[in-house]
Image (tube, rainbow, N blue to C red):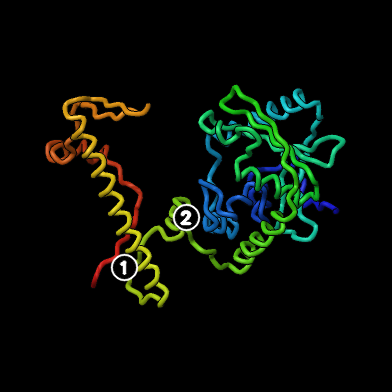
Amino acid sequence: MTVSVLAKTKDIERAEWLELRRQGIGGSDAPIVLGLSRYKSPVGLWLEKTGQIVPEEVGEYAYWGQRLEDIVAGEFTLRTGLKVKRKNAILTHSEYPFMIANIDRMIVGERAGLECKTTSAYRKDDWEGDNVPDAYYVQCQHYMAVTGYKTWYIACLIGGNTFVHKVVVRDDAFIERMIEVQKQFWDHVVNGTMPAVDGSDACADALKSLYPESNGKMVALPAIAESFITQYESAKQDEDAAKLRKQEAQHSLEELLGDNEIGQINGRAVNWKSRKAPERFDSKTFKVDFPDLHAKYAKVGEPSRWFSIKEM
């Protein structure tokens, strides 16, 4: 399999790099397309790929992940004896040009690559044994799909003091299914049609970006809206019933504790602790007594939209 080069990336400006990334589905995009990202939904990714929103600047986690990439790659070499080198290019799949790859490192002397990661100590369990987090597994399979390689290494620095490295083996059956899903997503990008929404917080954020303010108009909804209303109301009833059961259990435990602060059973502690009443700022009175100061320091929040279903 011949690997094509979309563009060289050495000394490239960020704006140009982002524009190149818009031209396809990259390794970090692949888990989003499959609905495996906690941070971004397929709808949010579609908005980026169609140029309707600009990708957010990298946060602290991503920034330090990039800064520590050399350290992770160097430690991988020390522990495995495998030499690595950079590939300063965005690669494309020979058959599906919308599949692109900006890989961290190539393994010298092998048809294999290396993905470098850093993560919080709170995510340590995700790396136990032979485990690789699902999103990173998909990312490695995506890179093998683009390059045609059979093996991909992944190394991760956990909590700044625990290092792990593992091997991800190519899964052709998985890659075939992944490519089909990516083809469907890319059709949405090319045609400008939004992919299906889901129930994730990431999708909620994407919809807020797409439709930030209402226009005051009323429209007739299509027939399919009836099924969504039924689904919503049924879920709301289940949610209310679950909340009631939860509160009933809590109240029963509080009755068992009485004046006591902690109860223990089978290695678990039930706490019902006293807390001091918090101080609260009386903004209404402050506005009346000091209107000029209130106007000076009051901040206007971001616009938002309230969702509800009710009888007309």
Q: Which mark is residue 284?
A: none
* Circle 1: element type: loop
Name above or below for residue 312 compared with residue 84: below
Q: In the rendering, at what x and y percent does residue 192 appear? A: 58, 67
Identify the amino acid type marked 2. Cys
The one of 55 and 266 positioned closer to us in this rendering? 266
The residue lying toward the viewer, choosing from 228 and 249, is 249
In the rendered image, residue 131, in percent from the top left (x then y), is placed at 63, 38
Residue situated in front as seen by the camera: 22 or 226: 226
Location of the C terminus (image quadrant): bottom left
Seen in the picture, residue 182 relative to 17 is either above or below; the reply is below
Task: Sort mark 2 into few (<14), some (14-19) or many (20+) by Cα contacts within 10 Å.
Answer: many
Instruction: Report the quarter where the N terminus lies.
Output: bottom right
Mark earlier in primary sequence (2, 1): 2
Nearest to viewer (mark 2 / mark 1): 2
Q: CA distance from mark 2 to mark 1?
A: 23 Å
Q: State the residue at coordinates (27%, 48%).
A: 245
Q: Residue at x 53, y 65 (%)?
A: 194
Residue at figure coordinates x 74%, y 59% from the top left: 97
Task: Pick out the residue farthest to the right.
Answer: 109
Whole-percent x, y for residue 40 in the image: 52, 50
> In the displayed structure, does residue 280 sit left or right of residue 86?
left
Amino acid type, label 1: Gly
Q: Residue at x 71, y 45 (%)?
A: 102
Where does label 2 land, which residue? 203
Badge number at residue 216? 1
| Residue in the foreground of this view, choosing between 31 and 89 | 31
- The image quadrant of residue 181 is bottom right
Secondary structure at badge 2 equals helix
Residue 112 in the image, given as x and y percentages of width and height: 80, 41
Which quadrant of the view contains residue 283? top left
Is 139 left or right of 244, judged from the image as shown? right
